[in-house]
């Protein structure tokens, strides 16, 4: 049985659809990441799941019980959840007091409160800050206090709204580490909204993609990032090379696809005559100075439009009759002296192409 089930949920605000016909199932002890562009409805869906907002249409099932309409049932479910906001608010008192407020509210005695607070402070790496005023802390430290408060009473569900959006890379990494340890140690069910796609890949069992208030794809991280169902999803997950095409010919699962500037070969179950999108991830494109002799079925000659170095990697945009972006190592780019105007070859496998039907 699903722990949380969202059935045909819709949400309106000022006459505008914020969520539209959302269907979602969340298993106990699993991590679901909601990704999507700004304004897609991620926070609105989190608030519906967390019983903070009642949906305009549809139903919410929590642990087998319909909690859509009954305020008593919604309150009981909400008490089993904790919500960490993107910009948490802390009380104007010590870090220790910020954590113990919630414990005392949940009826813990003084000894239980002290023991639990100390354990939680250690878990989030904030023991040395216990006597500091919480409002003097950095953004990353405040976020760790927010996690400590949320975890103090032992929630079954943890809802995270962009938990690292406003943090520097070091602080974000510490928060991710805390989330990872919580997941492994406590087996808490986690639903997180994030714009950081790599974060979703690292932490989540499943990923749901929200676009314009609708779940347009849901699945494992590999499935979503390598096999998007639509142009919108492909663009959002960084497929980057998305080219209009039409199936010219098929032989079993191998298709010849006509695109601007020529043809490519791909593995697909599409039929001849179908209009498709050809998706190629930059990291699946090999750049060379000569035509490679390999099992890869696609080797296209082209001219470099530009190169951009980013740390240990180099992004190379090539005119192959259509623009194609490749990602190579900085070392390879320097060894081949890749620069604007240079003639190169772009090679990629038939199985490295993701074919999306155009609707």
Image: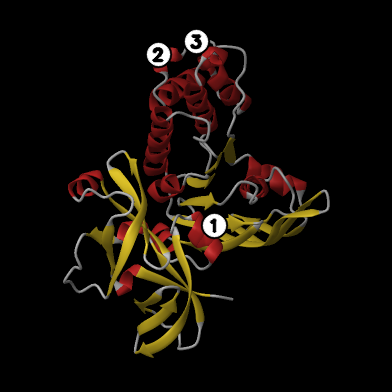
Crowding at label 2, few (<14), some or many (≥20) Cα neighbours within 10 Å? few
Residue farthest to the front?
Answer: 341
Residue at 74%, 45% in the rendered image: 72
Residue identifier under label 2: 128
Chain-order first, disc 1 or disc 3: 3
Badges 1 and 3: C-beta atoms under 8 Å apart? no
Quarter residue 80 falls in:
top right
Q: CA distance from mark 3 to mark 2?
A: 9 Å
Q: Is residue 134 above or below residue 354?
A: above
Quarter residue 268 falls in:
bottom left
Which secondary structure lies at badge 3?
A: loop
Q: CA distance from mark 1 to mark 3?
A: 40 Å
Chain-order first, disc 2 or disc 1: 2
Which secondary structure lies at badge 2?
A: helix
Q: Could you say where residue 345 lies in the image, as x and y percent from the top left?
A: 26, 64
Residue identifier under label 1: 209
Q: Could you say where residue 220 lies in the image, as x and y percent from the top left?
A: 42, 60
Which secondary structure lies at badge 1?
A: strand
Quarter residue 115 falls in:
top left
Q: Is residue 133 above or below residue 320?
A: above
Residue identifier under label 3: 132
Q: Could you say where residue 169 lies in the image, as x and y percent from the top left?
A: 41, 31
Residue at 24%, 72% in the rendered image: 296
Q: Is residue 30 rendered to the left or right of residue 347?
A: right
């Amino acid at each position: 049985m699903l722990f949380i089930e969202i059935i045909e949920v819709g949400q309106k605000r000022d006459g505008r659809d914020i969520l539209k016909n959302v269907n979602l199932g969340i298993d106990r002890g699993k991590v679901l990441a909601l990704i999507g562009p700004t304004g897609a409805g991620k926070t609105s869906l989190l608030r519906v799941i967390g019983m903070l907002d009642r949906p305009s249409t549809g139903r919410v099932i929590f642990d087998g019980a319909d909690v859509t309409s009954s305020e008593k049932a919604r309150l009981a479910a909400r008490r089993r959840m904790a919500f960490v906001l993107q910009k948490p608010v802390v009380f104007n008192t010590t870090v220790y007091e910020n954590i113990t407020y919630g414990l005392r509210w949940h009826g813990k005695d003084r000894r239980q409160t002290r023991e639990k607070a100390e354990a939680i402070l250690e878990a989030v790496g904030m023991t040395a800050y216990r006597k500091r005023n919480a409002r003097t802390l950095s953004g990353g430290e405040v976020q760790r206090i927010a996690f400590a408060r949320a975890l103090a009473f032992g929630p079954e569900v943890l809802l995270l709204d962009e938990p690292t959006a406003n943090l520097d890379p070091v602080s974000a990494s510490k928060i991710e580490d805390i989330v990872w340890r919580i997941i492994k140690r406590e087996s808490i069910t986690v639903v997180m909204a994030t714009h950081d796609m790599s974060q979703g890949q690292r932490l989540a069992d499943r990923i749901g993609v929200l676009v314009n208030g609708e779940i347009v794809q849901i699945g494992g991280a590999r499935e979503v990032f390598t096999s998007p169902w639509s142009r919108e999803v492909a663009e959002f997950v960084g497929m980057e090379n998305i080219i209009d095409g039409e199936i010219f010919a098929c032989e079993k699962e191998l298709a010849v696809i006509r695109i601007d500037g020529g043809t490519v070969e791909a593995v697909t179950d599409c039929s001849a005559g179908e209009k498709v999108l050809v998706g190629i991830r930059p990291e699946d494109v090999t750049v060379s100075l000569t035509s490679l002799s390999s099992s890869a079925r696609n080797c296209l000659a082209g001219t470099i439009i530009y190169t951009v170095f980013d740390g240990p990697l180099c992004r190379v945009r090539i005119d192959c009759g259509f623009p194609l972006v490749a990602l190579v190592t900085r070392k390879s780019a320097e060894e081949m002296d890749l620069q604007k105007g240079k003639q190169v070859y772009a090679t990629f496998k038939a199985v490295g192409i993701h074919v999306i039907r155009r609707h």
